[in-house]
Image: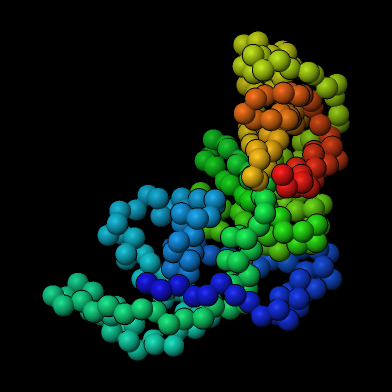
Amino acid sequence: MAHPELDIELEKFRELVGKALAEGGTQPLIRLTDEELAVLDPSGLDDVVAPAPHLATLSAEQREWVLATALRSLVSRGAVEVANIAELDAVLRSEGTESPLTADVDMRVTPEVSMALTLRRTAARALAVEQQTSGGSVTAFVFVHSPELMLIEQVTGGGMHIFTLTGTARDAARIVQALVDPFGTAGRDGDALRLDPSALTTDTVDGRLASVIDRALVVSQLIVLADAPGPLLTAYATDREVWTVSVDSPHAPTGITAQAVSERTLEQRIIDLIGQPTA
């Protein structure tokens, strides 16, 4: 199946960015499912870092069916325009017959869809976030293009991708912070603990940190994705407090610091990760 060109008119791009900035730096862009993204950008399943958790659970035959349904959904809600819809309809009706038809899809996407597809592919760096709870995992990515332009992609365990455009690192950090500290329990800053790499187990770390790790309701991993590996931040959120463990370099752990953090400090640490320079 052919996929649409990942382009967008410059004036429309400027219009959407200007609208986002005028409304406080954040603009909801679009929501797409795993299967809709697979229809719009098939190679993105391999080329883009964001996962497709729902598609990963399906067999090859099931994928074919859900992709056909996804295309119908995209057309019905106006996310794409299909020029050869009659030909495509004949193909869909021939499925399961002795002589199934085939045809490429001639389609164009809306500016919002084109922007999401383009920005998730072309960022020089990104902040990856994984939130783990007893109910499963949620991931998010902040694709950084400039200090004034970032695309946030949140991926639910069921395969829904929520795209948001933001114009400041602080606004992006607040969206990420809602995943890291969903209960809003980050209270006040505690003393910083310097840890040795060999001490990163609950058996040997400071008793206060070990207790938080044991009681954590939400564990989040944040790492900078760039040409050179960036810093790593792990956050443990309980019903009373939030602790972070910061690592300067994930491959050769150095500068390991653990600390109970306030809401303001947690936000600033996320901002610092988003603003990490490209190597």
- Judge by depth and name the residue closer to the eye, 209 or 251: 251
Residue extending furthest toward the top:
204
Question: Which x, y percent locates residue 40?
Answer: 48, 69
Quarter of the image where one finds residue 207: top right
The answer to whether one can see residue 24 in this image is yes
Question: Which x, y percent locates residue 228?
Answer: 66, 40
> Is 142 on the left or on the right of 67, as rendered?
right
The answer to whether one can see residue 240 in this image is no
Quarter of the image where one finds residue 266: top right
Q: Is residue 99 above or below residue 240?
A: below
- Judge by depth and name the residue closer to the eye, 265 or 226: 226
Q: Is residue 128 above or below residue 11?
A: above
Question: Which x, y percent locates residue 22?
Answer: 84, 71
Indicate how the structure is coloured in the image: rainbow
- Judge by depth and name the residue closer to the eye, 155 or 217: 155
In which quadrant is the C terminus drawn? top right
Q: Is residue 80 above or below residue 152?
A: below
Q: Residue at x 63, y 77 (%)?
A: 8
Q: Residue at x 39, y 79 (%)?
A: 105
Q: Residue at x 65, y 38 (%)?
A: 229
Q: Residue at x 71, y 15 (%)?
A: 196
Question: Which x, y percent locates residue 26?
Answer: 76, 63
How many numbered markers are drawn?
0
> Is 210 on the left or on the right of 155, as rendered?
right
In which quadrant is the N terminus drawn? bottom left
> Is 253 on the left or on the right of 94, as rendered?
right
